[in-house]
């Protein structure tokens, strides 16, 4: 889409939040088909499950290769993308979100505001005209009902310049639509949690490869991760989350023995390797002479707790049914 400005023709530019999921992919495709010049932003928060599996280790299959979907999508659509690491700032927001949590520890409203504020600054920097997302009205119970969408738009200072192509016809016209930069008639009126409309639209637009439409890439929406997070924050006096915590919360089986002592038991070779790496100045328990897990101990266990830890470590080894199992305890320093 081009707009006449004086004697010159101005190319309309838009900045889009692109996760690599179906909704954001469709939104980008819709605007590309209207001739909009798109610049995509993809954020690394530290809590993406797919990214975690790439870093820690996970099973690669023909159906789910461990690749960055946002980079794949932008490559296929031939649009530039900037990948931004916001993990350090994001950890602070996760511990004290202004608008609270969803069903688990997902601060979805604060998350959208944070990313869109960045997108607004990027829009101004490159001289773009508006920002767009793949948000769908009523798709997410916390962050995508009508009032939440209004809060997000206002708090990110994008009033009138935040376009949601998939639900645009159900929302007030934005500046891009009012100015004719985007044809509102070629936008959509999708709403609700079902994904049949998006799947049908993907087929219509020739998008054949995409992630499972239900999403679920964020650890913060996972109830087990949330349980471990809450346990950590309950017993940590300063309530500060660290990059090490983010990784360890996604690894292994967690057992709280006391307010001061917690253990993490690896579930596979990749997790055992990472627990060994994180064991500096902490106790490591491992079964001797037989295959078994690594147990990382956070805190200083007493003798009784050491016996319990040894028992738990042997329980998850290949020889837990033996009457006597040797377990070695060592403190890394």
Image: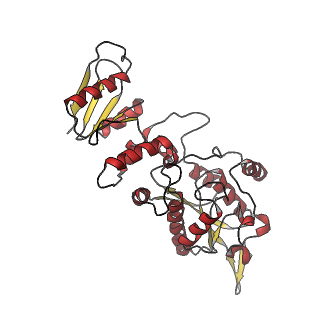
Above or below residue 192? Residue 282 is above
Identity of the residue drawn at 74% across and 62% down:
33
Q: Quadrant of the N terminus?
A: bottom right
Q: Quadrant of the C terminus?
A: top left
Instruction: Out of 236 and 113, give the one closest to the viewer.
Output: 236
Residue 210's spot in the image, x, y percent? 65, 46
Q: How many marks?
A: 0
Q: Is residue 62 visible?
A: yes
Above or below residue 184? Residue 10 is below
Identity of the residue drawn at 68% across and 76% down:
175
| Residue, far bottom | 6
The quadrant holding residue 159 is bottom right
Left or right position of 265 against 115:
left
| Residue, far top | 323
Residue 254's spot in the image, x, y percent? 38, 36
Identity of the residue drawn at 28% across and 14% down:
324
Above or below residue 215? Residue 92 is below
Instruction: Out of 174 and 118, give the one closest to the viewer.
Output: 174
Residue 207's spot in the image, x, y percent? 72, 49
Q: Is residue 244 visible?
A: no
Residue 331's spot in the image, x, y percent? 21, 34
Above or below residue 264? Residue 104 is below
């Amino acid at each position: 889409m081009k707009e006449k400005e004086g004697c010159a023709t101005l190319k309309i530019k838009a900045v889009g939040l692109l996760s690599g999921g179906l909704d954001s992919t469709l939104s980008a495709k819709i605007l590309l088909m209207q001739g909009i010049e798109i610049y995509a932003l993809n954020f690394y928060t530290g809590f993406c499950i797919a990214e975690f599996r790439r870093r820690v280790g996970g099973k690669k299959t023909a159906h789910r290769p461990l690749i960055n979907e946002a980079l794949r999508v932008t490559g296929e659509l031939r649009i530039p993308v900037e990948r931004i690491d916001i993990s350090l700032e994001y950890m602070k927001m996760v511990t004290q979100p202004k608008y609270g949590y969803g069903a688990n520890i997902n601060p979805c409203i604060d998350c959208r505001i944070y990313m869109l504020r960045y997108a607004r600054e990027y829009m101004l920097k490159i001289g773009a005209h508006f920002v767009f997302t793949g948000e769908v009205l009523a798709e997410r119970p916390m962050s995508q009902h009508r009032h939440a969408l209004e809060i997000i738009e206002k708090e990110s200072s994008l009033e009138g310049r935040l376009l949601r192509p998939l639900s645009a016809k159900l929302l007030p016209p934005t500046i891009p639509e009012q100015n004719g930069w985007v044809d509102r008639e070629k936008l959509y009126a999708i709403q609700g949690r079902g994904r049949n409309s998006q799947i049908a639209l993907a087929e219509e637009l020739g998008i054949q490869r995409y992630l499972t439409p239900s999403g679920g890439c964020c650890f913060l929406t996972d109830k087990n991760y949330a349980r471990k997070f809450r346990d950590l924050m309950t017993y940590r006096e300063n309530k500060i989350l660290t990059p090490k915590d983010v990784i360890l919360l996604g690894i292994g089986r967690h057992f709280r023995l006391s307010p001061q002592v917690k253990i993490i038991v690896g579930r596979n070779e990749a997790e055992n390797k990472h627990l060994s790496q994180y064991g500096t100045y902490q106790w490591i328990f491992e079964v001797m002479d037989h295959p078994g897990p690594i147990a990382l101990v956070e805190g200083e266990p007493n003798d009784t707790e050491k016996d319990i830890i040894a028992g738990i470590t042997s329980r998850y080894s290949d020889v837990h049914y033996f009457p006597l199992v040797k377990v070695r305890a060592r403190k890394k320093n």
